[in-house]
Image: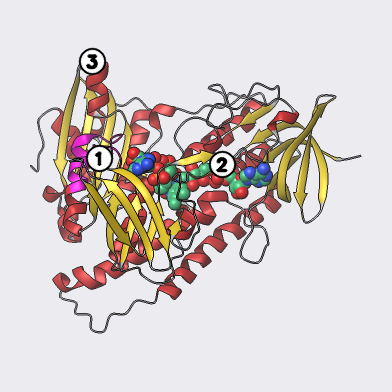
Amino acid sequence: MSKQFDVIVIGGGPGGYIAAIRAAQLGFNVACIDEWKNAKGGPALGGTCTNVGCIPSKALLQSSEHFDHASHHFAEHGIAVKGLELDVAKMLARKDNVVKQNNDGIVYLFKKNKVTFFHGRGSFAAAKDGLYDIKVAGAAEETISGKHVIVATGSSARALPGAPFDEENILSNDGALRIAAVPKKLGLIGSGVIGLEMGSVWRRLGAEVTVLEGLPTFLGAVDQQIAKEAKKAFDKQGLKIALGVKVGEVKSSKKGVTVAYTDAKGEAQTLDVDKLIISIGRVANTEGLNPEAVGLKLDERGAVVVDDECKTNLPHVWAVGDVVRGPMLAHKAEEEGVAVAERIAGQHGHVNFNTIPWVIYTNPEIAWVGQTEEQLKAAGRAYKAGTFPFMANGRARALGDTTGMVKMLADAATDEILGVHIVGPMASELIAECVVAMEFRASSEDIARICHAHPSLSEATKEAALAVDKRTLNF
Ligand code: FAD
Ligand code: NAI
């Protein structure tokens, strides 16, 4: 008789491990299957986010920012640094240690919440008698069965046709996070979130970085006033971004990589680099899940088809996170994981897609929630806009980090906040207040009337709210 569970979660990334913990908190007997292996072949819970995504990229962004500050900005504070040296191996080892702390943290959380962990690949084997049989192929092979299944198998980097990842010269996000020595020349294809974050890391460490982007617009999904401000800052830093290019043949040799492309004017160009990072989006992980065994429906891109509540076409089978529609963000995956566990328990789990924040952890940081000015115009919605520059914020001046602004958009008639867009210092933290405000359906006047600590960057949010009513106090 196979081991039987109330809930089986396939995938131990932020969608899966959080769903498993929440289901266990609600009293279910829960199993979580994850196949990720660390360098020693052992389990490494946390998925893409912990192993080759959010966490290691933020560790390297922090280290490289320290180096950039020591190289270029300490002097203006009267601090002279002589003989500054970079130890890339140590930087990468620190990053690996940060990852391991997060992997170990999830093992602890599973023990604390009595989630049974299986290390190996999970795949559908059969559906019978109201139960799903899931095969676990790890060091040994066994089949477990469960009443509910939550698919949380995540996503992987999309390869450029004709340029498969070798993780030596042509790198996915995985290889991009463990380049052993700073390349003299680094190329990236795709100026999306990974392109900008990883391009920033290696530029700060001294690489000459060129990003080739297919679309003619920079950060098309971002409010264009904010995107333009960010682009100006990246140009100043020396991050070369070529928009509207058409990438052709990619040739890799021992010497490096040559990319043939057509630029925005239609002229043929070549880019010679030591390493090339491909960051052109991600694809759902459903290979090896054996969905055919139970008739689980996938869409034409291989993602699991779900409704608004993360229900698949099969009874008691759910799917969350990167493997389904919607933004590929760790916090979106977590919210869906919690909501599904609560729905299984008969509660009313809820995810508000209008208030999922986005953050790009470059310098300046870019963060937003809600609708952009372009989206409001396209929808014909009457709105008021208020902006406030960090240049006029006392804390930003003290930090020596005055690039950017906060921009608030509110309904012209009701004053309800419809979107907030920030480019500047600590935008990732500032956006949280705006998410709370939008969840509570606050007006811009609500933010304008709330007391914000002085001197703090958050005063720029309050001033942007005042600007909606054309009454800023400090600008
Ligand atoms: P994943 O994290 O991909 O986890 C899926 C897990 O399932 C993996 O461990 C995988 O091995 C396992 N698995 C797959 N198939 C099977 C199977 N058949 N059996 C067993 N196990 C299986 N998002 C943010 O919100 N903020 C960020 O700062 C951020 N930075 C990022 C930086 C990079 C470089 C990348 C690549 C992504 C980043 N993301 C970020 C996106 C974020 O990592 C994903 O949105 C998030 O990891 C999705 O969570 P998930 O649980 O759906 O899937
Ligand atoms: P992305 O979707 O953010 O950007 C891909 C870019 O590549 C786009 O600008 C697209 O126009 C371009 N592109 C696509 N095909 C191309 C081609 N053939 N030639 C040239 N350009 C091409 O995808 P990315 O950067 O790979 O990241 C994947 C996802 O991971 C993100 O969308 C995001 O959901 C998540 N992520 C989130 C982070 C965060 O929250 N801070 C950090 C990193 C990743």
Q: The C terminus lies in which quarter of the figure?
A: top left
Compared to 18, does 305 lie above or below?
above
Q: The N terminus lies in which quarter of the figure?
A: top right
Residue 450: horizontal and vertical position, in percent? Answer: 25, 36
At 63% from the left edge and 53% from the top edge, which residue is drawn?
36
Residue 59 placement, left or right of 451: right
Q: Which residue is mark 1?
A: 244
Q: Which residue is mark 2?
A: 154
Q: Earlier in the sequence, mark 2 or mark 1?
A: 2
Q: Earlier in the sequence, mark 1 or mark 3?
A: 1
Compared to 75, does 133 lie above or below?
above
Q: Earlier in the sequence, mark 2 or mark 3?
A: 2
First to last magenta residue range: 212-231
Picture quadrant of residue 435? top left
Relative to the observer, which residue lies in front, 106 or 347? 106
Examine the structure image and report whether residue 54 is included in the region drawn in magenta: no
Residue 89 placement, left or right of 8: left
Q: Label 1, label 3: how many angstroms apart (C-alpha)?
A: 28 Å
Disc nearest the viewer among 2 and 3? 2
Residue 405 placement, left or right of 16: left
Compared to 109, does 130 lie above or below?
above
Q: Label 2, label 1: how many angstroms apart (C-alpha)?
A: 30 Å
Mark 2 crowdedness (10 Å alpha carbons): few <14, some 14-19, many ≥20: many
Task: Give the amino acid type for the residue marked by disc 1 in the picture.
Answer: Gly
Relative to the observer, which residue lies in front, 155 or 93? 155
Task: Give the amino acid type for the residue marked by disc 2 in the picture.
Answer: Gly
Mark 3 crowdedness (10 Å alpha carbons): few <14, some 14-19, many ≥20: few
Q: Which residue is mark 3?
A: 380
Residue 336: horizontal and vertical position, in percent? Answer: 54, 33
Examine the structure image and report whether residue 216 is included in the region drawn in magenta: yes
Q: Secondary structure at mark 3?
A: loop
